[in-house]
């Protein structure tokens, strides 16, 4: 298993850099950037469910086979991970607005494959290879990481909630979100996601969680920048001071 883990870990770390560069020039073709030439799409609720399911099941498998199922730190880590992925897999897709774009199968395959790799390295890396805590410094760090994670989780949930309520039933167009952290950045849902996985990396302190954070930022920062450009080009009245993802900075 360690060999598979090493391969997956280095793959995720190595591809994060070219993905970041590529996404600064090419917009991932889903949602507002969907392009027909990228092939057929499926219902977004089914798409999100299928591509996120590996991230629920694989770390749970590693946790259950780690021999640490009564360790309080492992229990906290699996609870935090599953909170995010249970929401993302079993709740988020089914609350999407009915006007949401279809999910291109190419995106589903790429993201499902990413969840397979990332779920494996985080499952094995945190629950089998990771430390089991215990010192006062560990406890302080884990509490601090947990607070960061939950701050990001709340920002992410709240921002997704605002987005899904922009459209009235039957509508499929785009509007300018004006509430919550949207007042400062155009992609606070991505900001929340990056804060969540920063908290996870601080809590678990493993190469796997660091790789996940790096990949998430490499994926979502360029998309937030593309979103800001898109809003500015589509809406002449788009608030000029609003940034992409970091209030007042980027
Ligand atoms: N960990 C990671 O690497 C990662 C990667 C991707 C996404 N995520 C998370 O997954 C969630 C969804 O991401 P996403 O990229 O799909 O978000 P998104 O592009 O902002 O879209 C989210 C939903 O809101 C709708 N929407 C977006 N902007 C709108 C607007 N201006 N007016 C009306 N409706 C609008 C979209 O409809 P359309 O589909 O019609 O555009 C879609 O239904 C987020 O919480 C994100 O953080 C995580």
Image (cartoon, rainbow, N blue to C red):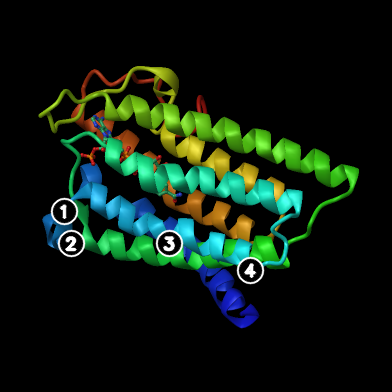
Where is ligand 1, by quadrant?
Answer: top left
Q: Nearer the viewer, mark 4 or mark 1?
A: 4
Q: Does the CB distance between marks 3 and 1 fall below 8 Å?
A: no
- Residue 143 vertical position relative to residue 3 in the rendered view, above or below: above
Relative side of 128 to 169, left or right:
right
Residue of label 1: 35
Residue at 49% across / 29% down in the picture? 155
**Which mark is in front, 3 or 1?**
3
> Which residue: 62% across, 56% down?
209
State which tag comes first along the sequence, 4 or 1. 1
Q: Secondary structure at mark 1?
A: loop
- Badge nearest the viewer, 4 or 2: 4
Callout 1 crowding tier (Cα within 10 Å): few <14, some 14–19, many ≥20: some
Mark 3 and 4 residues: CB-CB less than 8 Å, in contact?
no
Label 3 – label 1 distance at C-alpha: 26 Å
**Residue 11, x across and y down, in percent:** 52, 72
Q: Residues within 10 Å of mark 4 (few under 14, many from 20)?
A: few
The residue that label 3 is drawn on is 54
- Mark 3 and mark 2 in contact? Answer it, CB < 8 Å: no
**Alpha carbon distance from label 4 to label 1:** 42 Å
Mark 3 or mark 2: name the one nearer the start of the chain: 2
Label 1–label 2 contact, CB within 8 A: yes
Residue position for label 2: 38
């Amino acid at each position: 298993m360690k060999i598979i883990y090493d391969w997956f870990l280095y793959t995720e770390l190595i591809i994060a850099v070219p993905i970041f560069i590529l996404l600064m020039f090419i917009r991932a073709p889903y949602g507002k950037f969907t392009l027909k030439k990228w092939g057929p799409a499926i219902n977004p609720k089914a798409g999100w469910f299928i591509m996120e399911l590996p991230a629920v099941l694989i770390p749970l498998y590693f946790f259950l086979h780690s021999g640490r199922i009564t360790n309080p730190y492992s229990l906290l880590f699996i609870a935090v991970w599953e909170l995010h992925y249970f929401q993302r897999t079993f709740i988020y897709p089914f609350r999407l607005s009915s006007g949401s774009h279809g999910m291109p199968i190419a995106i589903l395959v790429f993201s499902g494959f990413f969840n397979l790799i990332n779920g494996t390295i985080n499952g094995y890396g945190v629950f089998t290879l990771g430390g089991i805590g215990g010192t006062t410094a560990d406890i302080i760090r884990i509490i601090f990481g947990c607070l960061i994670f939950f701050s990001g989780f709340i920002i992410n949930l709240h921002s997704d909630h605002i987005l899904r309520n922009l459209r009235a039933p039957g509508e499929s167009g785009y509007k300018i979100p004006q509430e919550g952290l949207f007042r400062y950045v155009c992609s606070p849902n991505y900001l929340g996601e990056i804060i969540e996985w920063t908290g996870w990396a601080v809590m678990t302190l493993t190469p796997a969680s660091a790789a996940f954070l790096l990949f998430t930022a490499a994926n979502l920062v360029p998309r937030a920048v593309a979103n800001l450009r898109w809003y500015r080009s589509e809406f002449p009245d788009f608030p000029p001071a609003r940034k992409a993802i970091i209030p007042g900075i980027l």
